[in-house]
Image (cartoon, rainbow, N blue to C red):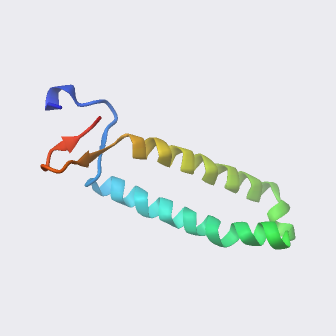
Amino acid sequence: MNKESKPAFMFSSTQAARERWDYFVMCIATWNALLLPIELAYEPEWTKTSANTWINAFIDLLFLLDIIVVFRTAIVGENGEIVTD
């Protein structure tokens, strides 16, 4: 694909912002991996608050956004060309 026809809102896999996004997603995935079993197994009182419900919903929204970002990220092909489709 030539430069003139680059799709809108396409991210590069080598951009610093994309790399920071990946680290952020790893952090919230770790958060979920640590706290979700505690919430399900022990059901502590702090997990029943509305703040915790909103935080979990926001994290789920961020994971949905991550799916969109991943599908809109260009990759480097076998010959070194940027693949955007």
Front in this rendered view, residue 55 or 34: 34
Q: Is residue 9 left or right of residue 2?
A: right
Image location of residue 85, percent across then percent down: 29, 35
Image quadrant assignment for residue 29: bottom right
Residue positioned 68% across, 50% down in the render: 57
Of all residues, the one furthest to the front in this rendering is 78
Q: Is residue 73 left or right of residue 39?
A: left
Q: Is residue 85 left or right of residue 57?
A: left
Residue positioned 84% across, 61% down in the render: 48
Image location of residue 76, percent across then percent down: 21, 49
Residue positioned 80% across, 64% down in the render: 47
Image quadrant assignment for residue 19: bottom left
Image location of residue 64, percent across then percent down: 55, 45
Image location of residue 56, percent across then percent down: 69, 55
Q: Is residue 40 left or right of residue 82?
A: right
Tally the numbered discs: 0
Above or below for 4 versus 9:
above
Image quadrant assignment for residue 22: bottom left
Residue positioned 41% across, 46% down in the render: 70
